[in-house]
Image: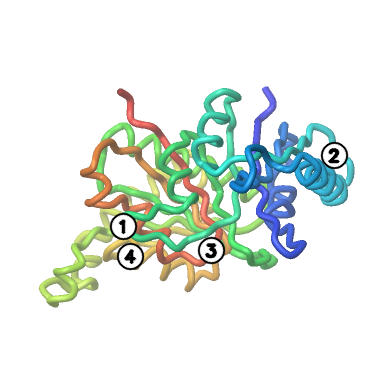
């Protein structure tokens, strides 16, 4: 069955980088591709200007034709909505989307959630949040593995992260690196109660062994592994910077209720500090 990819076009000042990245990722996959540009409703009238919408549709179609050079199964449309996340979530549920690609915007605060984070929380398929930076040639891709829990859900999530990393590596031809950050509470580090090097010496060998077993299970022994220690929202962006990664693949587990909002989700905390493209792989919790 053909894969179905939804691209949320972010077009400003004739910049089409999000669409160009979508082209580079998806053309080898040969999916059905829907490219949507969103326009906010015209609050000064009861309905949007039809002429303006038609002009935007025509312009988008022309640029899609130029960027994809006439590739089949590429559709484009302009949608009038002031709630992108809800529209995309409904669309993904109705059409079984396999991947969403969107240009990133990160200016969130505790009670102000921008579109990126609403999308991550509401949709149930992987989403690639793309920066406005061109990919470097032969950059590394970093896979964030989590051994902190041994339940089936997290094991499935690790497997899915490896699957998507392998899939994208075959498209981009970029080397894969897998990293696990041994958890250390931030206050313990700040108060110098715990030494990171001692934690790695004590827990690193077991973590390294778990990593090698996981990679071997999926025939990915060629992946370079790294074991670090500390809060993931600090260590993972640091590793991405050290490795000069263009893309980080990280897992996200859905949680319900306000407990998640105030406790925070590791993936969301990491996203606050990442300056790379990020593929968020999700597995919804079974009700």
Location of the N terminus (image quadrant)? top right
Q: CA distance from mark 2 to mark 3?
A: 28 Å
**Mark 2, residues whose alpha carbon is within 10 Å: few (<14), some, or many (≥20)?**
some
* Mark 1 closeness class: few <14, some 14–19, many ≥20 residues within 10 Å: few
Q: Residue at x 67, y 49 (%)?
A: 9
* CB-based contact (under 8 Å), mark 3 and mark 1: no
Judged by depth in the image, the label closer to the viewer, 4 or 3, is 3
Mark 2 or mark 3, earlier in chain: 2
**Position in image of residue 245 (x %, y %):** 54, 65
Regarding residue 141, the answer to whether it shows in the image is no
- Report the residue marked by disc 3: 276
Front position among marks 1 and 2: 1
Judged from the image, the secondary structure of the residue bearing numbered disc 2 is loop
In three-dimensional space, the C-alpha distance between marks 3 and 1, rounded to whole angstroms, equals 22 Å
Compared across the picture, whether 73 is left or right of 3 comes to right
Q: Which mark's residue is nearer the viewer, 3 or 1?
A: 1
Screen quadrant of the C terminus: top left
The label shown at residue 228 is 4
- Mark 1 or 4: the one toward you: 1
Q: Which residue is mark 2?
A: 71
Classify 107 as above or below 52.
Answer: below
CA separation in Å, label 4 and label 3: 19 Å
For marks 1 and 4, give the CA distance: 28 Å
The residue at the point 52 percent across, 26 percent down is: 93
Determine which of the numbered discs, if any, sits on residue 264 in the image: none
Q: Earlier in the sequence, mark 2 or mark 4?
A: 2
Disc 1 target residue: 110
Residue 63 in the image, given as x and y percentages of width and height: 83, 50
């Amino acid at each position: 069955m053909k894969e179905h990819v939804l691209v949320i076009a972010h077009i400003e000042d004739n910049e089409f980088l999000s669409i160009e990245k979508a082209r580079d990722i998806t053309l080898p996959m040969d999916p059905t591709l829907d490219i949507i540009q969103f326009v906010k409703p015209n609050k000064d009238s009861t309905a949007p200007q039809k002429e303006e919408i038609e002009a935007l549709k025509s312009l988008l179609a022309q640029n899609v034709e130029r960027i994809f050079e006439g590739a089949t199964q590429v559709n484009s449309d302009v949608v009038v909505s002031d709630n992108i996340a809800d529209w995309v979530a409904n669309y993904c549920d109705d059409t079984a989307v396999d991947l969403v690609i969107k240009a990133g915007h990160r200016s969130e605060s505790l009670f102000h959630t921008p579109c990126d984070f609403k999308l991550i929380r509401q949709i149930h398929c992987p989403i690639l949040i793309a920066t406005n930076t061109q990919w470097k040639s032969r950059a590394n891709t970093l896979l964030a593995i989590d051994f902190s829990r041994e339940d089936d859900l997290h094991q499935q999530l690790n497997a899915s992260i490896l699957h998507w990393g392998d899939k994208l590596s075959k498209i981009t031809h970029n080397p894969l690196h897998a990293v696990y950050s041994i958890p250390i509470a931030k206050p313990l580090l700040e108060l110098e109660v715990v030494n990171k090097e001692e934690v790695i010496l004590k827990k690193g060998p077991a973590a390294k062994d778990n990593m090698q077993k996981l990679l071997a299970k999926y025939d990915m022994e060629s992946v370079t592994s790294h074991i670090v220690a500390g809060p993931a929202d600090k260590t993972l962006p640091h590793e991405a910077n050290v490795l000069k990664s263009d893309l980080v693949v990280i897992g996200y587990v859905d949680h319900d209720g306000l407990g998640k909002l105030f406790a925070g989700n590791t993936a969301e905390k990491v996203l606050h500090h990442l300056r790379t493209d990020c593929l968020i792989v999700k597995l919804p919790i079974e009700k």
